[in-house]
Image (tube, helix red, strand yellow):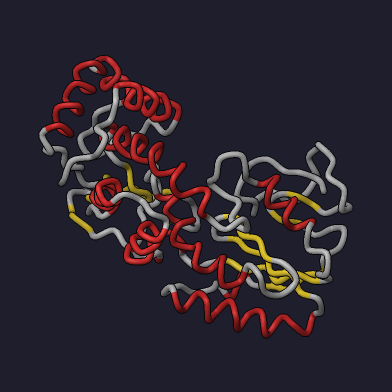
Amino acid sequence: MGPLNPPPTDLEWRRAWRRVRRAGRTPGLDRCSLAWFEERLEAQLANLHCAFADRAYRPRPYRLLEIGGRKRRTIAIATVRDRLVQRMALERLQPLVDPRLHPASCAYRPGRGVTAAIERLRGFRRARFVLRADVRNCFPSLPWRTVRRNLDRFGVPPDLRDLVQALILRCGVRNGVVERIPGLPVGAPLSPLLANVALDDLDRQLGNRFAGYVRYADDLLIGLASCGEALEAEAALDAALRRGGLQRSPEKTRVAALEPGLVWLGARLDSLRPVPSIAPAKRAKAPLGRGFVV
């Protein structure tokens, strides 16, 4: 792996460490806990300084775990050391990438989130209906070639891009068996931002069509001036997804009237005026634990 220019500073490592401490505590493949790492933090940071200076840093495979109840999914747990490197890389990558992302993308972005998504939905002035759809098996389906092409389009330096590639394109180990991880590893600190990078093509193809468009992670709404536009919107969405090697989830696709009572992201449209309280909506399907009334 080539050198990272400029080399990570002590301030960057310590800022990244604070982010790692606030995140998940499950050990990676080496079984080193956060507590163990923190007890040896100064030595670990010195080792990372030397590894990057000598171009000797190599990330380890992910530890693969299955979680969930009826609907199981696999998450990839990096070692604490690799999580620290991912957080450092994320701190450098975010300010380069975020300003270039389409404004319809609202998840995993500083200063945005559910509130920004709802505000954009409120801007669907001509829409009387919405097509709600979901990108099937999103993170594992996003090809690295799309991420890499868009990182280059956004002007990300090759040394940072290559470090991100080395961190993401790792195998995983489940019960002692080595497995290939398709797409972006679920659970990796870099994956949410890189998902937005990969889906930027979709956002740009649909962002100026129909009567509105907003995407929160893999969940999206397309504004429709009439119910008759639904088939055209579905066809346009499917075509845009196919260009990226993706698919829509037919079972999660539906058309709804854009009127009071619509529930999205845990928010219920009681009116077109935002009020700072939580609606008694069904929140089980919401990507976040908080809700808003609009």
* Location of residue 243 in the rendering, given as x and y in whole percent from the top left corner: 45, 78
Q: 266 above or below 83?
A: below
**Which one is nearer the viewer's eye here, 287 or 56?**
56
**Which one is nearer the viewer's eye here, 136 or 95?**
95
| Res 37 visible | yes
Please indicate whether residue 179 sits to the left or right of residue 261 in the image.
left
* Location of residue 132 in the rendering, given as x and y in whole percent from the top left corner: 67, 68
How many numbered discs sit on the rendered protein? 0
**Which one is nearer the viewer's eye here, 49 or 270?**
49
Residue shown at 45% from the left, 27% from the top: 22
Q: 10 above or below 142?
A: above
Please indicate whether residue 10 sits to the left or right of residue 196 in the image.
left
Residue 277 in which image quadrant: top right
**Which one is nearer the viewer's eye here, 144 or 170?**
144
* Location of residue 21 in the rendering, given as x and y in whole percent from the top left corner: 40, 25
Residue shown at 84% from the left, 40% from the top: 275
| Res 140 visible | no
* Location of residue 193 in the rendering, given as x and y in whole percent from the top left corner: 45, 49
Residue 177 in which image quadrant: bottom left
Q: 76 above or below 205?
A: above
Residue shown at 64% from the left, 41% from the top: 289
